[in-house]
């Protein structure tokens, strides 16, 4: 049973998947930091010092009544909130991550596949067969007589 598991794990696609997940998680952290620490502060500043992480709607006040200065204060008080600012941050994270994956992974792979396909179309396949001029059957290139129609070949 252990040998089968070892064979399964050592297959290329499983290892590739594991590496992809680790790199994807690290890349996700980079994008998250980019959005949270680099992009959102200037956007918030342009919109009048808005901190998107603190945009929320109180559905039900907590033990301590509102208004609440921040999302953390509201959650500490036990208020039930809709955190649409956190959602906006997550949405921007997703869009940046999706664009990065598209432009740095999907698009280059599609271009590579198209280039490879065009090379295959240009280079004819080398073969050791030819068509019989009488019956159009594939026969060996060195044949002097067609084995199907028995015609003499030149």
Image (cartoon, rainbow, N blue to C red):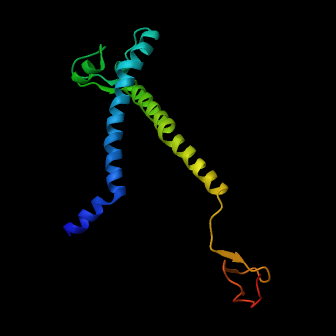
For the point 47% across and 36% down, the residue is 98
Relative to residue 131, is residue 120 drawn left or right? left
Closest to the observer: 107 or 116?
Answer: 116
Compared to residue 25, the image places residue 123 above or below, namely below
Q: Is residue 91 above or below residue 40?
A: below
Q: Is residue 77 left or right of residue 90?
A: left
Residue farthest along the top direction in this orientation: 48
- The image quarter in which residue 126 lies: bottom right
Query: Measuring 39% from the left and 15% from the top, which residue is drawn there?
Result: 41
Outermost right residue: 134
Residue 137: quadrant of the picture:
bottom right
Up/down of 30 relative to 108, above or below = above
Seen from the viewer's position, the closer of residues 129 and 11 is: 129
Q: Position of residue 61 (x, y in %)?
A: 29, 22
Residue at position x 32%, y 38% in the image: 25
Task: Kindly identify the residue that appears in the image at 68 percent across and 83 percent down.
Answer: 143
Can residue 1 be spotted in the picture? yes
Which quadrant holds the C terminus?
Answer: bottom right
In the rendered image, residue 127, in percent from the top left (x then y), is placed at 63, 70
102 with respect to 63 (left or right): right
Q: Where the N terminus falls, by quadrant?
A: bottom left
Relative placement, left or right, of 109 versus 146 is left
Number of numbered discs present?
0
Question: What is the x, y in percent for residue 94?
Answer: 43, 33
In the displayed orientation, state which residue is furthest to the bottom: 150
Q: Residue furthest front?
A: 154
Name the foreground residue: 69 vs 8.
8
Whether residue 57 can be seen here: no
């Amino acid at each position: 049973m252990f040998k089968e598991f070892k064979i399964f794990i050592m297959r290329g696609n499983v290892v590739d998947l594991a590496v992809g997940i680790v790199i994807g998680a690290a890349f996700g952290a980079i994008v998250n930091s980019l959005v949270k620490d680099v992009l959102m502060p200037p956007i918030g500043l342009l919109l009048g010092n808005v901190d998107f992480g603190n945009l929320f709607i109180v559905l039900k006040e907590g033990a301590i009544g509102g208004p609440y200065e921040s999302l953390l204060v509201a959650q500490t008080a036990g208020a039930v909130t809709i955190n649409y600012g956190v959602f906006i941050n997550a949405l921007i994270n997703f869009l940046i991550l999706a664009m990065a994956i598209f432009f740095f992974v999907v698009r280059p792979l599609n271009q590579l596949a198209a280039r490879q396909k065009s090379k295959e179309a240009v280079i004819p396949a080398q073969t050791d067969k030819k068509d019989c001029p009488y019956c159009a059957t594939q026969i060996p290139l060195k044949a002097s007589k067609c084995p199907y129609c028995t015609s003499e070949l030149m």
